[in-house]
Amino acid sequence: MAVTPADVLEALSKVQEPELHRDLVTLNMIQDLSVEDGKVSFEIVLTTPACPLRTKIESEARAAVAALPGVTQVEIHLGSNVISDGKPRGLMNLPVKNAVAVASGKGGVGKTTVAVNLAVALAETGAKVGLLDADIYGPNVPTMMGVDRLPPFDNGKLTPAETYGVKMMSIGFLVPPGKPLIWRGPMLHSAIRQFLSDVAWGELDYLIIDLPPGTGDAQLSLAQSLPLSGGVIVTLPQMVSVEDAARGLAMFNELNVPILGVIENMSYLEMPDGTRMEVFGRGGGEMLAQNEGVPFLGAIPMDPAVRKGGDDGKPVIVSHPQSAPAQALRSLAEQLAARLSVNAYQNQPAVTINVVG
């Protein structure tokens, strides 16, 4: 008996998306299904191109279909359609599916380094990514991304700079180097709103926002101006840093921003003999996440390549792609994308399964 599209869908209904805990058919992830003379082809539409379990999903789907009597060949294409968090951003005229704030309780913990590399890692997967440098008092994103000027205006709007596949905007492009910005209250609020509404961002899957350290006007202005999909807190393992990071988590809770997780930066330094030197202590980030009941996304080891990449305008993801920090940052980007997909799933619109032939 010849295999039918209904048989294939029945088999695929037994394959679960591990993060969402629903089957691929129910999630409308199967598209362009074709069955002809025992040859089956279809597309699996992932919820993010950064899906950390794409290989597992493809393997299980292939095995499920190949086990059907009469199937001689299985061809699977992997696509993606990033789910929007469903939050209204129409007032800002900002077509952004997910907006993520990267924050820290204090300066010097590598928050901007993490934000820059997360943005580049997401862009490497094929996602449309923007990076907003909202750290008004220390705008380091242009230096870390190796860009010192903006392109010409686009129909009266600022055109974001673009490099490594990431669109970016920073106050650092608009003020002379070394000039201090003594902004508070209405002036700061106005600047952040302009960076959102007066920049030609285009459609974005992810907008990564590098907040100033601490808890203050900039964080409040951003939360009031742009509905956030969630926030990430960066900390060192050091207890002093962890205490300040806890205040950052409390800030997100006060502003009703979902907490996506904690990242521990500069977790350890790997020595030439393979041992680890825990320069700033051990396990502070994971302890904070456990105490606050939020996810611990992971730890990033220390490496001189991270500092050099930032100074040279080449994020470590690009300059040393096989290094331990780069691999950790890619894993963090995948986890972040997965958590955003899970959080946005309930707002996903229905999609029709297309059967070809």
Image (cartoon, rainbow, N blue to C red):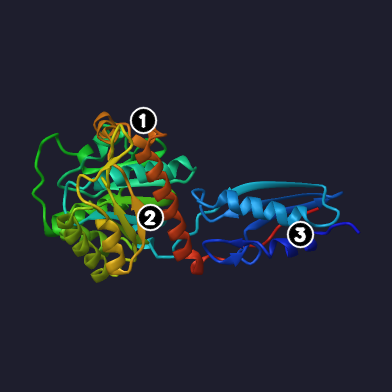
Q: Which residue is mark 1?
A: 319
Amino acid at dot 1: Ser
Disc 2 from disc 1: Cα separation: 32 Å
Mark 2 is surrounded, within 10 Å at the Cα level, by few (under 14), some (14 to 19) or many (20 or more) other residues, namely some
**Closer to the camera in the image, 120 or 235:** 235
Say what secondary structure mark 3 lies in.
helix
Q: Seen in the image, is 6 located left or right of residue 281?
A: right
Residue 350 makes an appearance in the image:
no
Q: Seen in the image, is 3 located left or right of residue 254?
A: right
Amino acid at dot 3: Val
Q: Which residue is mark 3?
A: 8
**Closer to the camera in the image, 252 or 152:** 252
Which of the marked residues, 1 or 3, is nearer the chain's N terminus? 3
Q: Seen in the image, is 112 located left or right of residue 18?
A: left
Say what secondary structure mark 1 lies in.
helix
Say what secondary structure mark 2 lies in.
loop
**Closer to the camera in the image, 288 or 65:** 288
Q: Position of residue 181 (x, y in %)?
A: 11, 45
Q: Is residue 336 above or below residue 224?
A: above
Q: Which residue is mark 2?
A: 94
Residue 299 makes an appearance in the image:
yes
Amino acid at dot 2: Leu
Q: Position of residue 175 (x, y in %)?
A: 16, 38
Contact (Cβ within 8 Å) of mark 2 with mark 3 = no
Mark 3 is surrounded, within 10 Å at the Cα level, by few (under 14), some (14 to 19) or many (20 or more) other residues, namely many
Q: Quadrant of residue 260?
A: bottom left
Q: Is residue 304 above or below residue 96?
A: above
Q: Position of residue 144 (x, y in %)?
A: 27, 36
Residue at horizontal 55 percent and vertical 61 percent from the top:
18
